[in-house]
């Protein structure tokens, strides 16, 4: 949560719990569930959006339904950890549509990527672009997901 974020009370947390399950829930129904008026719910949601508590309102798409059935996790180790090279890697990974998630991490790897692709040929082409084509990638390790057991971005909320 950004440092300027408002403190969240029990109403805010209850609203967030509902929105995490289904962000298309009408504000009237949210209000009924949390015992607030729809305009009060609307004000609270707007405040949390402006403060960055609610980062985005999106549809979660099943990758296989749109031709990206393969999920791959990649550990990337850089040659140099100079700030400008790390920032360049962050930009490149962020701008690559196949990269669903990118984490700058501690440990042996510098980045962990979550990638979705149509097939292994598409992944091979991506490795040529992102890894083999970069002078700053020392090595990368690939882990292909065999099954999607749990996928989500729900954040546990305090009671």
Image (tube, rainbow, N blue to C red):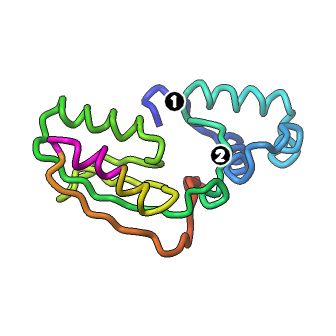
| Residue 8 point in image, percent of width and height | 59, 38
Q: Is residue 37 above or below residue 71?
A: above
Q: Nearer the viewer, residue 106 or 149?
A: 149
| Residue 75 point in image, percent of width and height | 28, 58
Q: Nearer the viewer, residue 150 or 35?
A: 150
- Label 2 crowd (10 A; few <14 / some 14-19 / many >=20): some
Q: Is residue 154 above or below residue 84?
A: below
Residue 80 image-quadrant placement: top left
Q: Which residues are magenta?
A: 126-136
Q: Number of labelled discs?
A: 2
Label 2: state its secondary structure.
helix
Left or right side of 109 for 30: right
- Label 1 crowd (10 A; few <14 / some 14-19 / many >=20): some
Q: Nearer the viewer, residue 150 or 19?
A: 150
The answer for how far apart the CA atoms under marks 1 and 2 are is 14 Å
| Residue 27 point in image, percent of width and height | 83, 37
Q: Which residue is mark 1?
A: 5
| Residue 15 point in image, percent of width and height | 72, 43
Q: Residue at x 42, y 63 (%)?
A: 120
Label annotation for residue 24: none
Residue 20 is a magenta residue: no
Label annotation for residue 13: 2
Left or right side of 138 for 8: right
Q: Residue at x 36, y 41 (%)?
A: 93
Q: Is residue 10 above or below residue 68?
A: above
Left or right side of 94 for 131: left
Label 1: state its secondary structure.
loop
Q: Residue at x 70, y 30 (%)?
A: 44
């Amino acid at each position: 949560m950004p440092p300027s974020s408002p403190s969240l009370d029990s109403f805010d947390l209850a609203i967030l719990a509902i929105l995490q399950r289904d962000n298309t829930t009408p504000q009237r129904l949210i209000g009924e569930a949390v015992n607030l008026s729809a305009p009060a719910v609307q004000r609270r949601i707007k405040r949390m959006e402006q403060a960055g508590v609610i980062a985005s309102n999106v549809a979660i798409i099943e990758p296989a339904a749109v031709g990206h059935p393969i999920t791959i996790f990649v550990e990337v180790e850089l040659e140099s950890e100079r700030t400008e090279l790390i920032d360049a890697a962050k930009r490149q990974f962020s701008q690559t549509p196949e990269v669903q998630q990118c984490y700058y991490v501690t440990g042996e790897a510098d980045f962990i990527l979550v990638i979705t692709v149509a097939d292994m040929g598409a992944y091979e082409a991506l490795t040529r672009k992102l890894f083999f084509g970069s002078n700053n990638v020392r090595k990368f390790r690939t882990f292909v997901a065999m099954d999607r057991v749990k996928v989500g971005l729900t954040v546990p909320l305090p009671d």
